[in-house]
Amino acid sequence: MSAFPSGSTPGGRPFGGEWDWARNAARLYARRPFLDADGQAFTFGEWSRRVDRVAGFLSAQGLKPGDRAGILLPAGVQAAELVFAAIRAGIVLVPVNTRLHPAEVERLLSDAQPQLVLVADTLRDRLSVGSGRAAVVTLGPFGADPERDPLLGDARGWAFEPGPEQIQSLIYTSGTTGSPKGAVLTLGQHWWNAVGSSLRLGHDPRDVWLLCLPLFHVGGQAILFRAAIGGNRVILEPRFDAGRVARWLSSGEVTLVSLVPTMLQRVLDAAVAPFSPRVRAVLLGGAAVAPALLERGRQAGLPLVPTYGMTETGSQMATVDPLDDDPRVGARPLYAADIDIFAPDAEGVGEIRVRGPQVSPGYWVGGRLQEESGWLLTGDLGRLDEEGRLLVLDRRADLIVSGGENIYPAEVEAALLQDPRVTRAAVVPVADPTWGQVPAAAVVLAAGATADAEALSQALRTRLASFKIPRHWKVVREIPETANGKILRRAVQGWFGEADA
């Protein structure tokens, strides 16, 4: 697959403007409000003109269509500008999780090999000297005067026309393995995801999205694209704040929001006023939702809509039908999405697999696209009910989902084994009332070595993001294994209780 299609329809008519969603929205909805962020508000017409100037900035840095640009920026006007400007200039975006440790950032950039990295001055310390051997541009904050945005370059006419096969971004995820790799996301994927979401939730041009997900996650970018395609307004929060989100949902201004279960729990805890009946859908993804939390949300008057997806599917892949009376029923595949159960057991439980135009064409490996074809095995366990609705039973056997962030035990175990005091390690999830799950570690120490939980945690902080550090610890004599040397994680998990420390 090429990142850049021929740029013409079968009849020979040039096309591409419809794939530049900022430009198309300016043509269709120029005067409608689009984005509220960083204390500023922009119409679609104003936004497209800014996008043109940011694309000019990228070009002035020497980037050309097909090049990659890493961004390490907080959620705000600048990050959103780059999301759309990269499409206009044909640049592949590489969003970097702002919570990663510098060593993790370096590994990601070394794999993606971007030609340029744009980093906020407040995050500059996350970049090591190498920075994946990319040029680095440090950006000051977006200020009160939109015209002083350091990203604004000279506007120019753009001959490049994007198409559905254009690679929009590489978003790093461990996928179904424990080794982070860049999932390739195309404009066509995002289009089908937006269409499928709109058909499931219904479309109203008066909808207002509250965007409180990070823009380095696919879920955050997906909301921007859905709004631009559908002509809707977005209120972009710089970070998740439960009290602010609760107030927005009570204000009568917001109609749609996407949360992970931990976020929902905190919003319910923070609410001081009834939620507005104008809120017509609260998408819940990123982790399994406890029935008690669903019931609590329903009792509070929120229309909860559980959804299933992953980075490789551009966000949503299956979503509960809002007309179903009970959100605990299974999720129905979105339009054009295909979901199946691979190797089901006698009860119909097996590994969830997916295919369709929403699914990534492959991964970025060794500096090029490694294409995947056919079904994508997700690693999740589930089953389909008699109506074909998906019931997810486990979010990957070994995966820890903590506050919406994925933590892979193999990565934490590998970091632990870099400590000379540790000879064996097993990392498993432990239920947590705030985060849903947190990592717990059982370790075997080398002969004569001593270490307590604080010492082991401190050593890991030099290698891993803080959310990956185990919250519970046990020093043991041995780690139970299978005959072929794999850790018996269920046995290890049984050693931990919620109160262990």
Image (cartoon, rainbow, N blue to C red):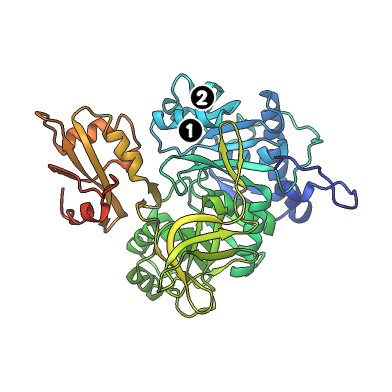
**Element class at badge 2:** helix
Looking at the image, which residue is at 77% across and 55% down?
28
Q: Residue furthest left?
A: 448
Residue 279 seen by the camera = no
- Expressed as whole percent of the image width and height from the top left, the position of residue 64 reads 71, 29
For residue 454, side relative to residue 350 (left or right): left
- Expressed as whole percent of the image width and height from the top left, the position of residue 233 reads 62, 56
Mark 1 or mark 2, which is nearer the start of the sequence?
Answer: 1
Assess disc 1: are there few (<14), some (14-19) or many (≥20) residues with their C-alpha within 10 Å of its C-alpha. Answer: many
- Expressed as whole percent of the image width and height from the top left, the position of residue 141 reads 52, 32
Residue 218 marker = none
Residue 208 seen by the camera = yes
What residue sits right under mark 2 in the picture?
A: 132
Question: For the residue marked with disc 1, what is the amino acid?
Answer: Leu
**Element class at badge 1:** helix
Q: Nearer the viewer, residue 44 or 111?
A: 111
The N terminus sits in image quarter: top right
Residue 108 marker = 1
Q: Is residue 34 above or below residue 451?
A: below
Looking at the image, which residue is at 43% across and 40% down?
179
- Expressed as whole percent of the image width and height from the top left, the position of residue 377 reads 51, 55
